[in-house]
Amino acid sequence: MRENFPRLIVTDSSGDVREVEIAKPEFTLGRQSDNDLVLFESRISRRHARIVKSPQGYLLEDSGSRHGTYVNGTLVTSCLLKSGDQINLGIADSYALTFLMQEAELPGLLEELGKATHSPAPQLEHLNLLLQVAQILYRSPKLETVLTALLDSAISITGADRGLLFLRGADGQLHMRLARAQDEITLEPPPDNYSQAVVDRVAETGREEMALEEAATGRATNETVTIQGSVRGVVCVPLVKFPVTDARGESISGGVTEQMGVLYLDSRSRATSLTGLDRQVLQTLAVEGATVIENARLLHLAREQERVQHDLALARNIQQGLLPRELPTSSYFEIHAFTVPSSGVGGDYYDAIVLPDSRFGFVVADVSGKGLPAAILSANLQGAFAAVAAGDHALEEIFRRVNDFLRERSSPAMYATMFYGVINPAGDFNFVNAGHAYPMVVRNGGAVETLETSNFPVGLFPAVTFEAGHTHLDAGDILLLFSDGLTEAQNFRNDLFGESRLTDVAKECSKLAASEVSEKILGAVRAFVGNAPPSDDMTLVVLRFGRM
């Protein structure tokens, strides 16, 4: 029989759920791509924790992580897990992990009963059949294989001529998913000459219905069901998934059963003949079948989530590859930059444009929205802006062209705030701010100034004109370009980091190198936020005019 491995139910910050089976003696968790469970969160350690199978059970061990490992809210270095334990990898409200070790009841029961299958009793022959189908149900990861095995076994147990399987869709309505006849024949097209009233009634009440024609009278044994035409027997049972149980095997308080569908069987050649035990076997098959269908669905969901996570990882690598591999070096300034997406991919980016006469342009942009849509628009915007800016047009003309480009190629709901400035060796800094966060200039003496000029974001309105601004940098002055994700970073109390805190930190940076300024600001933001999940992408470009 199949070993029932424990599993983790993984819920990310956006509410998406996937199930991961712990099928290895040592199962690793962390940010690094070669872990058994990869979690895309920058504050989760590369090798954060592991789950080890021991004689006592499954042991969770912290692997020296930076933020610690928690079980049910308690910090642990090593903990014997029990079913239902909640695991947190030091980052609250990011990934929620639930450890489950729920044994399936049917395989163990059938394994014992299967020892008696040589008995001539027909009831044990049915149990032997269940044993065989259970092996298929619990070993196959494919939903279609599970459904086929379930329906074929029900036909064999009842002696029905055909069986129909209905499952509830996302709309909550029943839909015929599979129709089979004896000898494992799929009925195509699916039949429509079945008792729709019986199916609807069982779906509504959640109770089985049976109508068997009496040989002597030709009447149905159950007067609530009318046997019409050539049909001589109808059996219809709900597919019911029971509530999740806790570690003691008791139902969770308030839990309710969930009806996943209906199993319908009928016979034209003869009335089906079910003893009390046969009915119990059929009911057991329906209940366990519903559970296995749900498991197959969860596995499909888990694989889909893994595919999405894989695609997100590829998209993140591509997006990171679009950022400058090396920022420009110059005799008259030094520069450092970073961007931290709030999820796998983000809508922020920064770039550097090399211009004639030893001039350089620097851009920071923030596309509306989050995730893949924002990342796609961000990549399009980055390519378009770099191509136009490299032509060394007037700043106002650059933004006019980019605004027209976005208006023509994106939906009205998608736009971007941008800041672009050009510096020359004399310290002249000309710029356009298109709805972006106001940059700051930290003067050599420690005073902080804000460049408070602004225009509409690009892509928001057609035929918009843009106005340029100007400032002058002296040796030792520091320019801070950033996205609003930095000043709007939130802690668990929903307080914002804010411009005043950024100003206070900036005042302490006047004598630091560009890389040191970047590290100091990022450290201050992270210390303020703590373990709260990131609310937006963060980008910072630090330009120090004059070499240290």
Image (cartoon, rainbow, N blue to C red):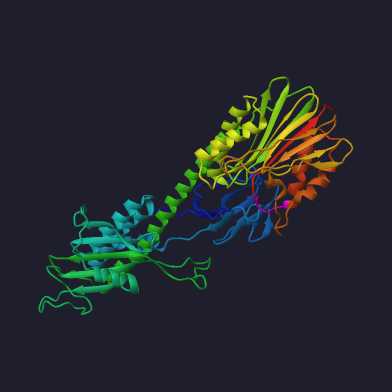
Front-most of residues 416 and 219: 416
**Left or right of 354 on screen, residue 182:** left
The residue sitting at the right extreme is 445
- The prevailing secondary structure element of the residues shown in magenta is loop
Q: Say if residue 467 shows up in the picture.
A: yes
Which sits in the foreground, 283 or 317? Answer: 317
Residue 64 lies within the magenta run: no
Q: Which of 33 and 11 is in front in this view?
A: 11
Quadrant of the rendered image containing residue 338: top right
Taking 270 as reference, is 136 above or below it?
Answer: above
Question: Residue 525, image x and y in percent?
Answer: 74, 47
Q: Which of 354 and 201 is in front in this view?
A: 354
Q: Give the range drawn in magenta.
A: 529-535
Q: Residue at 66% x, 27% y: name it.
A: 353
Q: Which percent across, then down, holds residue 60?
A: 61, 53
Residue 46 drawn above or below residue 85: above
Horizontally, residue 37 falls left or right of residue 483, namely left
Q: Is residue 128 visible?
A: no
Quadrant for the C terminus, please. top right
- Residue 512 placement, left or right of 538: right
Q: Is residue 317 left or right of residue 171?
A: right
Residue 24 appears at what percent x and percent y? 51, 46
Quarter in which the N terminus is drawn: bottom left
The x, y position of residue 270, in whole percent, is 13, 67
